[in-house]
Amino acid sequence: MSSSHVLRHVDWVTAGALGEPGERTFLLQAHASADYVAVVCEKEQIAALAQVARELLSDSGTPLTDAEAEGGELRLAPVVPLWRAGVMAVGYDPESARFLLRVEQRGDTGDGVLDLVLRRDQLAGLAADALFSLDAGARDRCRLCGELLDPDSVHWCESGGDRPTFVV
């Protein structure tokens, strides 16, 4: 059974994860007008999507800025996914200055296709959200300030009072 969706005027798009590290479900979600879609992705697909989006933004002459990359957030809506993602591709149309994200359904369970037409800011936000969800889900947060903890360095929290506090 075919389950194809084309969203030409996307209101928002995000990639992220639900659940605890090691047991997370990664998702791509988009909303346009009355249409809401979600597909389950592999962690590696979300990582590749973030990387390819960054490269494509750079190739189109509008690279992802550091501020944009750090602006990601987890903002997934309640989810009923259409299917599990298989092949994913991102392209750029210089005439319209729009990006196309195509996601094909995985496996022999159907021939679903999801096409999202995105503006530059939407692709940049998608990349930032994907990067954030990969990073945030893999690391603990400081119990005082909420910042992500780097497992390879010491965190001196400024929120601990009069002097920085060592947090483990």
Image (cartoon, helix red, strand yellow):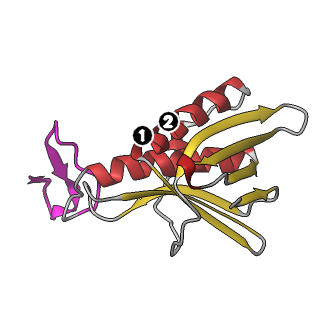
Q: Quadrant of the N terminus?
A: bottom right
Q: Amino acid at mark 2?
A: Ala
Residue furthest to the right: 95
Residue 28 against residue 56 in the figure, above or below: below
Residue wearing tag 1: 44
Choose between 28 and 61: the one closer to the eye: 28
Marker disc for residue 48 = 2
Q: Amino acid at mark 1?
A: Glu
Choose between 22 and 2: the one closer to the eye: 2
Residue 121 against residue 145 in the figure, above or below: above
Question: Who's the residue at 59% across and 64% down the image?
Answer: 82
Marker disc for residue 147 = none
Q: Tell me the magenta residue range.
A: 145-168
Residue 42 sits inside the magenta stretch: no
Does dot 2 land on a helix, a strand or a loop?
helix
Residue 106 visible, this orientation: no
